[in-house]
Image (cartoon, grey):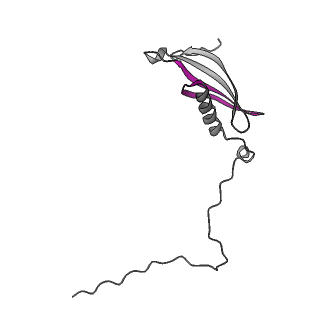
Amino acid sequence: MTTPEPARRRRRPPQGDDDEQPRTRPARKASASQRHGVPSAAAAMRAAAEQLSELLGRRPESVSSLKPTDDGWQAVVEVVELERIPDTTSVMASYRVQLDEQGELISYERTRRYSRGMIDRLGG
């Protein structure tokens, strides 16, 4: 007859005084813009695309430009204006979008229309 092995006890980490607080990871520092209520660049890109989509009723293809301004952010968002077959002949548009310091859309304007397959030429 074999005797069963004794159950192994798990080691507990050493316990400190009751007054000690449990160790936690230090929180990530917020970027300077997040600390002042201004959205990050990634959040501004999402906000520009989402809010323009709501206004136009079309899904943006991409955000081709994003830059901070004194009052928030300015983005250029590419949108399919007219879908065609083949899709390289679809009509695209570039929209300049202004966001305020909280990431809310305050203005937009269409700046360019072009065929999806069109390539910009240098110097012209």
- The quarter holding residue 78 reads top right
Residue at x 72%, y 41% (from the top left corner): 38
Question: In this view, which residue lies farthest toward the top?
Answer: 124
Position above or below: 26 against 115: below
- The quarter holding residue 124 reads top right
Does residue 57 appear left or right of residue 6 in this picture?
right
Does residue 61 appear left or right of residue 106 in this picture?
left
Residue at x 67%, y 41% (from the top left corner): 40
Which quadrant is the N terminus positioned in?
A: bottom left
Q: Nearer the viewer, residue 33 or 58?
A: 58
Q: Is residue 46 visible?
A: yes
Q: Is residue 63 visible?
A: no
Magenta: main secondary structure = strand
How many marks on residues?
0
Q: Position of residue 7 (x, y in %)?
A: 37, 82
Magenta residues (range): 56-82
Residue at x 75%, y 45% (from the top left corner): 36
Q: Position of residue 108 (x, y in %)?
A: 68, 24
Q: Position of residue 32 (x, y in %)?
A: 73, 46
Q: Is residue 78 magenta?
A: yes
Q: Is residue 89 magenta?
A: no
Q: Position of residue 20 (x, y in %)?
A: 66, 75
Residue at x 60%, y 31% (from the top left corner): 49
Question: In this view, which residue lies farthest toward the left?
Answer: 1
